[in-house]
Amino acid sequence: MLVHPQYGTHQGVKGLEFDRVMAIMDDNSANGFLFLYEKLFGAQELSQTDIRNQSEGKDSVLSRTRRLFYVICSRAEKSLAIVAYTKDPKVVKRKSLESGWFTQDEIEMM
């Protein structure tokens, strides 16, 4: 049991490392627009602006969210748990597998 648990925001842990990391992805509770995990994982359609920015190589919600997701995942030295609150778990799982981010045995749906 950890006596002094450590908590941080997704952005605030950049450069830090931990034995175990649990990240919660919940766009509805985040109330933001700069990072949208639902779009990165395919559970929400891309807007015309997203598609245009991506095709023109501009910074976009997808590129920002992808970089932030990398920061989250790369903080764990031994164990990583991602909790994704989503309206479409099957799509999120499929995108995770197709992207090679996780393997079948690393994903549990509840």
Image (tube, rainbow, N blue to C red):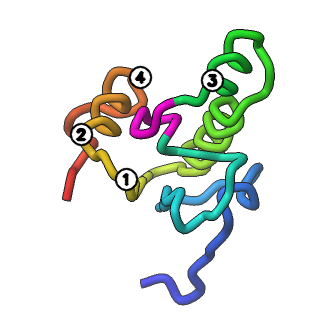
Circle nearer the viewer, 4 or 1:
1
- For the point 30% across and 35% down, which residue is it? 91
**In the image, residue 44 lies in the stretch drawn in magenta:** yes
Q: Residue 66 location in percent, x, y? A: 61, 34
Q: Is residue 52 left or right of residue 58?
A: left
Tell me the quarter of the image containing the C terminus: bottom left
Identify whether 33 is placed above or below 19. Answer: above
Identify whether 4 is placed above or below 98. Answer: below
- For the point 59% across and 30% down, which residue is it? 47
- How far apart in space, not on screen, are marks 4 and 1 (Cα)? 18 Å
Identify whether 19 is placed above or below 98. Answer: below
What SS does tag 2 mark?
A: helix
- How far apart in space, not on screen, are marks 3 and 2 (Cα)? 24 Å
Identify whether 105 is placed above or below 54. Answer: below
Is 102 in front, or is 59? 59
Provide the residue designation for mark 1: 86
Marks 4 and 2, the one that precedes in the sequence: 2
Q: Is residue 17 left or right of residue 23?
A: right
The span picked out in magenta is: 39-45
Provide the residue designation for mark 4: 99
- How far apart in space, not on screen, are marks 1 and 3 (Cα)? 22 Å
Marks 1 and 3, the one that precedes in the sequence: 3
Residue 81, visible in the rendered structure: no
Provide the residue designation for mark 2: 90
Q: Which of the 4 image quadrants contains residue 105?
A: top left
Disc 2 marks a residue whose amino acid type is: Lys
Disc 1 marks a residue whose amino acid type is: Thr
- How far apart in space, not on screen, are marks 4 and 2 (Cα)? 14 Å
- For the point 67% across and 69% down, which residue is it? 8
